[in-house]
Amino acid sequence: SQQGEEDPQALSIQEGENATMNCSYKTSINNLQWYRQNSGRGLVHLILIRSNEREKHSGRLRVTLDTSKKSSSLLITASRAADTASYFCATENYGQNFVFGPGTRLSVLP
Amino acid sequence: DVKVTQSSRYLVKRTGEKVFLECVQDMDHENMFWYRQDPGLGLRLIYFSYDVKMKEKGDIPEGYSVSREKKERFSLILESASTNQTSMYLCASRLLLGTDTQYFGPGTRLTVL
């Protein structure tokens, strides 16, 4: 089944550095979304990128999508301690439900 | 802003008890979802509903049932709780499939002793 799988599983960086997380999936998709989850909380939507788009920006977030490689990346620039969270990609095929990956746990050290 | 609320943040139950988890959304969304989240496994879909009184099984429906009597409310029921149902349960709602984002509740951490 199609599944987003994030890489790396865990990432630790210093405040001010950039963080890059990757997501790979197996089948065709309609769109791909990134979510953030603070410890013990629900998921918060960050950004949606459609299959005909290659790159999107939102504030300090940059998402790329390469449908030929079935992969996406999330870049967080100038990271802050408040960015510490788990990040999930979710892929969606036409009319079907989201499939979430296991997530990347990001730690931003002050 | 869409608001999705869940009845409890933390819940402790005993094996064999019947457990109800309630979810309410305030944006008139058609679609509602129940997931469980376990370390290393990500979110797994238990059940979803695309309309009142309609329900569809997700990837892991065994041991669960759901009820949607009103559009804004979607309940997850554990008929006889077991220790392997100890998990974080997340409810979500969404207006349209295929074009929209999902909005999540804060989650219920259920412990079954």
Image: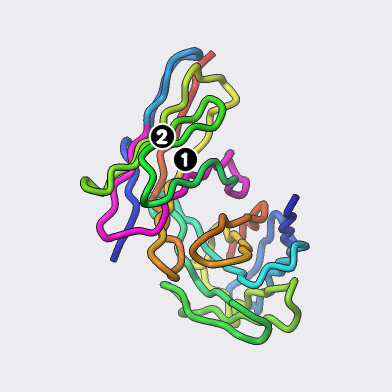
- Marked residue chain, label 1: A
Check the image and report above or below for A86 versus B24.
Answer: above
- Name the spot of residue A39 as percent of width and height, x first: 58, 40
- Residue positioned 56% across, 27% down in the render: A59
Which of the two marks, 2 or 1, is nearer to us in this view?
2
Q: Quadrant of residue B20?
A: bottom right
Residue A81 as seen in the image, left or right of residue A94: right
- Name the spot of residue A49 as percent of width and height, x first: 44, 46
Q: Looking at the image, can residue B83 be seen?
A: yes
The residue singled out by tag 2 in the image is: A74
The three-letter amino acid code for the residue at tag 2 is Leu
Residue A12 as seen in the image, left or right of residue A24: right
- Marked residue chain, label 2: A
The three-letter amino acid code for the residue at tag 1 is Tyr
- Residue positioned 74% across, 68% down in the render: B28
- Name the spot of residue B5 as percent of width and height, x first: 74, 58
Residue A40 as seen in the image, left or right of residue A19: right
User: Is A6 covered by the magenta stretch?
Assistant: no
What colouring style does the render use?
rainbow
- Residue positioned 46% across, 79% down in the render: B62
Extreme left residue here?
Answer: A69
Verify CB contact (< 8 Å) between mark 2 and mark 1: yes
Range of residues picked out in magenta: A21-43
